[in-house]
Image (cartoon, helix red, strand yellow):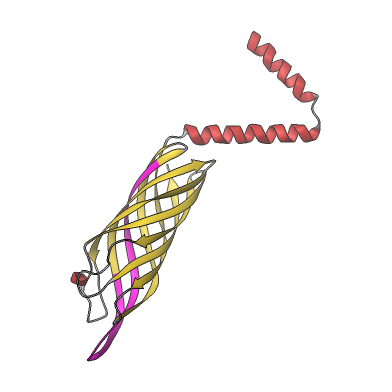
Amino acid sequence: MAWFLQIAAALQYIKTLSMKNKIILSALLMLTASFAFAQGKKNAAGVYIGPNFPKYDISSLNLSADGQTGFQIGAFYRKGGLLYGQAGLEYQRLKSYLIATDSFGSSSGAVDINRVQMPLYLGLKLLGVRAYAGPTISYTVAAPSFNPEFDQTDFKRFGVNGTVGGGIDIIIFSVDAGYTFGLTNLFSDNYDGNANYVFLNLGLKF
């Protein structure tokens, strides 16, 4: 009965507040409820798809590259509240137009680098807004080329890159954007350069 009397007293007090104070109180209660809900949901999994926009940082003087719009599709598992960890698995295609020059002239053509990647993030989440960073481990599975100077053996199989990003969760939807910067050489022997890219993902979480 004591708790009922306390609720009744609280409601009576709210009635005495001005409209402005009632609005402020309602906003604070909604903010508190949203925060509690966000912290209460500890685990989430989902799928996503989106474009990427590569920019190649080439050190070799006899090679230049223009990035073309590619894509990635993947799945993730997220665990934690305010501080969370996230692991994922994705298939990515980085598209490029490579121009190689030597004493005999130049060759050019499109090269599509197809990779399986494992993003591993540590992040902060507050009221559905997320910020995160971490390594992205990649494995090149194919590199079909329209440039006769390149084939799959010209690209390193394994690589480790770094990612920073942010996102927002809206009901069952998620939107993410970030930047991945190359930490290891993209090429195996003859050239030096890194693959950096901006990504944008639209996902569903469960």
Q: Where's the C terminus, which quadrant?
A: top left
| Residue nearer the viewer, 129 or 69 | 129
Report if residue 152 lies within the magenta region: no
Residue interval drawn in magenta: 85-112
Magenta span main SS: strand
Q: Pick out the residue farthest to the top.
A: 1
Q: Residue at x 80, y 33 (%)?
A: 19
The number of numbered badges drawn on the structure is 0
Q: Is residue 116 above or below residue 125?
A: below
Q: Residue at x 69, y 12 (%)?
A: 5
Report if residue 107 lies within the magenta region: yes
| Residue nearer the viewer, 64 or 49 | 64
Q: Is residue 139 above or below residue 25?
A: below
Q: Position of residue 15 (x, y in %)?
A: 78, 24
Classify residue 191 as left or right of residue 176.
left
Q: Residue at x 54, y 41 (%)?
A: 127
Q: Is residue 201 above or below residue 20?
A: below
**Which image quadrant is residue 12 in?**
top right
Q: Where's the N terminus, which quadrant?
A: top right
Q: Position of residue 183 (x, y in %)?
A: 32, 61
